[in-house]
Image: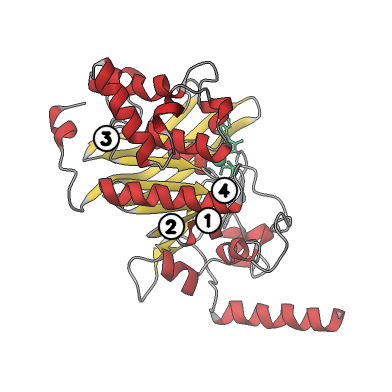
Amino acid sequence: MSAQLQTAGRQGGGTLIEVENLQTHFTTPRGVVRAVDGVTFSLERGKALGVVGESGSGKTVLSRTIMGLVPRRGTHLGGAVRFEGQDILGRAPKDMRGVWGKEMAMIFQDPMTSLNPLMKIGRQIEEPLRNHLGMGRDDARATAKRLLTDVRIPEAERRLDQYPHELSGGMRQRVMIAIAMACGPTMLFADEPTTALDVTVQAQILDLINEQRRDRNMSVILVTHDLGVVAGHTDEIAVMYGGKLVEKAPTRRLFAAMKMPYTEALLQSIPKLDEPSHTRLATIPGRPPDLVNPPAGCRFAPRCPYAREKCLNEEPPLEQTSDDASHSFACWYPVGSPEYLDKRAEIDAQKVSVA
Ligand SMILES: Nc1ncnc2c1ncn2[C@@H]1O[C@H](COP(=O)(O)OP(=O)(O)OP(=O)(O)O)[C@@H](O)[C@H]1O
Ligand SMILES: [Mg+2]
């Protein structure tokens, strides 16, 4: 990593990441899996972007490709990932070492698989500090203690000498955040960081990530299949379907004026507060697209109740809405259009006649 990149200002706004026509295609015995297929977006410094979509829509592959963490053999990478102005896509791991941890950090869904069960918590936080920042033993220990305190772990000193299994799930996720924060990254990827936790602890962890983001002017990409999770914790939302970005808007705007019937269906799959907890999420009928042979037109068309002939044959481009340049979507007959409303009336009439 160049000196310029290392010392780039951490204050203020400006673009931190630009992803352009990104493609991650995996060669498999079944054919080429187009896991990420032409994704473009940018993210400002200090902002949080939620990436949502059903299972298999490409959220994890997208984040791992940006971080340079996808397997290289048999993988075709296309497009560009500019981080602080430099294209880092496809860099060799040895050239990414200065970026990982220090510039970009990641927290995963299950801290038990990311933490080393045989190593005390303290050592797991101190190692990156010593390796990346060259801290001595005492400094690293003191910093580790401060980091645990920052992520609201009580009795930090005692926790440093404990093993992961001695901590609750929520505490382990806090330790993961402390490790991710250790070297002061400018960019944090959080991939389903709360799915293993109960609802109250989930909210605490998301609040904690937000607090760290504000304190450090860090950018965050929060990956989840649950629109509810990102609602209060992101500035913008990107919706993925079948390896493509199909809608993107500031969070409030997305909830107030979503355009894609797929986004609408995702929203309907959020459990309601008045339903008993652990109610199974309503899923969208039909199966996600085959990423080896994706549908010719809109990838969601075969499952979309509002689809027409054109949707099955012609792929809609991702375009800005007419009244708001920050809101883009890819749909021929978006929510609220006359064609959508016609179909909606038909569907509602059918429901009434069935009942
Ligand atoms: N190394 C790989 N080789 C081949 N296919 C892969 C590989 N990694 C991921 N895929 C495929 O790419 C697609 C996208 O996977 P990805 O893990 O990004 O989905 P996701 O949106 O994160 O889903 P989830 O919500 O379940 O985590 C899936 O069809 C997956 O099977
Ligand atoms: Mg995933």
Q: Please give the name of the residue rendered at 59% of the width and 78% of the height, measured from the top-left corner.
A: 339
Question: For mark 1, does the 10 Å Cα neighbourhood hold few (<14), some (14 to 19), or many (20 or more) residues?
Answer: many
**Residue named by callout 3:** 87
Q: Secondary structure at mark 2?
A: loop
Q: Nearer the viewer, mark 1 or mark 3?
A: 1
The mark found on residue 355 in the picture is none
* Marks 4/3: CA–CA distance: 25 Å
**Residue named by callout 1:** 229
* Marks 1/3: CA–CA distance: 31 Å
Q: Nearer the viewer, mark 4 or mark 2?
A: 2
Q: Are marks 1 and 3 in contact (CB under 8 Å)?
A: no
Res 268 quadrant in image: bottom right
Residue 182 in the image: state x and y as whole percent.
32, 31
Q: Please give the name of the residue rendered at 61% of the width and 81% of the height, measured from the top-left corner.
A: 341
Question: For mark 2, does the 10 Å Cα neighbourhood hold few (<14), some (14 to 19), or many (20 or more) residues?
Answer: some
Going by the numbered disc 3, the residue's amino acid type is: Asp
Q: Of residues 237 and 187, which is closer to you in this image?
A: 187
Decide if residue 301 is on the left or right side of residue 114. right
Going by the numbered disc 2, the residue's amino acid type is: His
